[in-house]
Image (tube, helix red, strand yellow):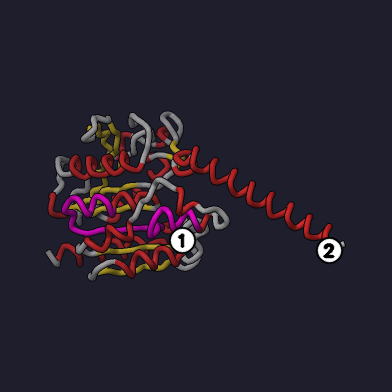
Amino acid sequence: MIRHVLKFIRSLVIAAVAAIALWTIVLMALEDQFIYFPSVYPDGLYGAVQPSMGITDCWFTTADSVKLHGWYMESPDPIATLVLSHGNAGNISHRLDLMRRLHRTGFNVFMYDYRGYGRSEGSPSEKGIYLDGRAAFDHSTTLPAVEPSKIILFGTSLGGAVSVDVAEDRSPAALILESTFSSGKELAQELYPFLPVKIFMKSEFNSIEKIRSITIPLLLIHGTDDSIVPLRLARRLFDAAHEPKEFYEIAGADHNDTYIVGRTPYFNTIADFARRSLDRR
């Protein structure tokens, strides 16, 4: 009887190890497909854009010669210019509502698509989207009504890692991070706790190391009910950052609805942070 039980347990262990090995190989082979979920034009909400919105199409080129697309909304008396780097799914058309609300709050807003997203050329990769973020920042300095000394990077989810990378390499006035994480490997381990992803994952998105060298004002926004990026990973990133820094926790918000749940206080918090940050310069 004991021998049969031991044999059964051994079979279960072998099956579990085989399953873990198989899924690890799948994740390694298809890593980019597990990270990037782009919607390519015309997929999206492009039909919602009307001439009366005052949205300008922007085309610019990265350091490795990839042509990217973005949208710009100019404010008559801007608090600052926000350069918005979005998350890993969809494209800029899915963030049109957020863009318009930030514009109504008093900002110039420049939002762009990474390579392989929307109308941008190429295929996404960690190195590539960092180049995209830097090119977007550089292009924003050439847009009408933009004062280069009043550019604030705003990154959501995966875009947080992009914005941190750009902040380390360029000179923005401040940094806003929303629904983002400490590192890609730590997030992957949260999503796949039974797989050794931290060992084999090639992509790093190591924001927690980069943020240690950034000294500009930081606002970190996160929902208490984020079902994709645990609040503790945002706190780890925040704890590693230098002062001045602020943590804005939105009770009841999930990963993609922070501004909807936060409502007016959400936009007021961003505007107040921007004004305070510019006053420090």
Q: Secondary structure at mark 1?
A: helix
Say which quarter of the image contains residue 179.
bottom left
Amino acid type, label 1: Val
Is 182 on the left-hand or right-hand side of 229? left
What quarter of the picture does the N terminus occupy? bottom right
Whole-percent x and y of residue 65?
23, 29
Whole-percent x and y of residue 55?
28, 38
The mark tally for this picture is: 2
Dot label at residue 185: none
Q: Is residue 121 magenta?
A: no
Q: Secondary structure at mark 2?
A: helix
- How far apart are the two marked residues, 2 and 1, measured between alpha carbons? 57 Å
Q: Which residue is mark 1?
A: 261
Relative to 147, residue 41 above or below = above
Circles 2, 1 touching at the beta carbon (< 8 Å) = no
Q: Which residue is mark 2?
A: 2
Magenta span covers which residues?
164-189
Amino acid type, label 2: Ile
Is 37 on the left-hand or right-hand side of 85? right
Q: Is residue 188 magenta?
A: yes
Q: Residue furthest front?
A: 3
Q: Earlier in the sequence, mark 2 or mark 1?
A: 2
